[in-house]
């Protein structure tokens, strides 16, 4: 299988990306504190049917952090730059956790770039997280903000926790503009509130919702066969519609 590793320079950061396989492009966006390798089960499952575009979010994996404060608008520009570099005009997006939030940001910013969306355990705002996890996240964000003034590594952690404690801020009214097929997946024991996940589903026209029994926030990695089957079925259905 064809395999490439590259970087694209985006204003103040080198963004790492990897291309695996051939076929219709599928962009995979990982969660907070992770990198593209967390999708190893998805890579093996989908590489024979799709051209996988794997991106390390800035400050994650092999991508440099840059010097600006992170937000999902900035991260979306990084993703768009990778697609432009590859000459890819349209792609399906699979995002997990912060990656789901990023995929949604790209879809709202550049709707013509997105053919379909799979949003796994995403949220529209920090309050979408369960209270205990949200409060721990805010505490860690505050601690690393203090330590980050004298320690560069802590400053990076501050940025990471900031993406969860202070972001995203998805405008709910804009979700009605989404015209592409959307699959929303969350675990029944997710860190995202179930009513928040259902709220996202209700806001996005004609979206599909699946709550995976027994799964937590990391279900896509802990139960890859279950998630891959659902995602694969959704992609085949939506790709067929696009081709018609």
Image: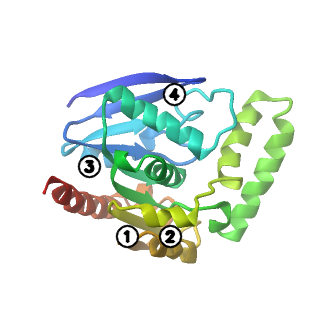
Please state the horizontal and vertical placement of residue 210, each as a whole percent of the image: 39, 72
Q: Nearer the viewer, residue 181 or 197?
A: 181
- Give the secondary structure at mark 4: loop
Q: Sequence order check: which comes first, mark 2 or mark 3?
A: 3
- Taking the spot 58% from the left edge, 26% from the top edge, the residue there is 64
Give the alpha-carbon distance from disc 1 to disc 3, as whole Å. Answer: 24 Å
| Label 2 crowd (10 A; few <14 / some 14-19 / many >=20) | some
Q: Residue at x 80, y 55 (%)?
A: 139
Residues at discs 4 and 1 in contact (Cβ within 8 Å)? no
Instruction: Classify mark 4: residues with Cα within 10 Å, few (<14), some (14-19) or many (20+).
Output: some
> Tag on residue 48?
none
Any part of residue 65 in sight: yes
Q: Which residue appears at 43% of the width and 51% of the height?
A: 107
Residue occupied by mark 2: 200
Residue behind mark 1? 207
Q: State the image coordinates of residue 83 (x, y, percent, origin top left).
A: 37, 34
- Which labelled disc corresponds to residue 45? 3
Vertical order, 189 against 153 (above or below): below
For the C terminus, the image quarter is bottom left
Tell me the quadrant of the picture where the N terminus can be found. Answer: top left
Given this view, does label 4 or label 2 mark the residue nearer the observer? 2
Q: Earlier in the sequence, mark 4 or mark 2?
A: 4
Q: Which mark is residue 62?
A: 4
- Residue 99's place in the image compared with 149, above or below, is below
Total numbered badges shown on the rendered structure: 4
Task: Compare marks 3 and 4 and give the one earlier in the sequence.
Answer: 3
Callouts 1 and 2 close, C-beta under 8 Å:
yes
Q: Is residue 76 left or right of 143 when viewed as pictured?
A: left
């Amino acid at each position: 299988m064809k395999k490439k590793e590259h970087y694209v320079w985006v204003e103040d950061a080198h963004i790492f990306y990897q291309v695996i396989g051939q076929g219709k492009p599928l962009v995979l966006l990982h969660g907070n504190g992770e990198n593209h390798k967390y999708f190893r089960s998805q890579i093996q499952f989908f590489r024979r049917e799709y051209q996988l575009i794997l991106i390390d979010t800035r400050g994650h994996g092999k991508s440099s952090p840059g010097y600006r404060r992170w937000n999902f608008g900035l991260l979306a520009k990084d993703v768009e730059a990778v697609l432009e570099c590859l000459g890819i005009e349209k792609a399906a997006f699979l995002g997990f956790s912060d990656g789901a939030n990023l995929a949604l940001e790209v879809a709202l910013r550049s709707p013509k770039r997105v053919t379909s969306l799979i949003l796994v355990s995403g949220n529209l705002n920090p309050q979408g997280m369960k209270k205990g996890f949200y409060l721990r996240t805010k505490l860690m964000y505050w601690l690393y903000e203090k330590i980050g003034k004298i320690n560069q590594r802590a400053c990076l952690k501050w940025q990471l926790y900031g993406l969860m404690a202070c972001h995203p801020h998805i405008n709910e009214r804009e979700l009605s503009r989404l015209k592409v097929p959307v699959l929303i997946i969350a675990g029944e024991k997710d860190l995202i509130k179930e009513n928040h996940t259902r709220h996202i589903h209700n806001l996005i026209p004609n979206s599909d919702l699946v709550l995976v029994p027994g799964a937590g926030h990391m279900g896509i990695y802990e139960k890859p066969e279950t998630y891959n089957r659902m995602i694969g079925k959704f992609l085949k259905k939506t790709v067929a519609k696009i081709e018609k």
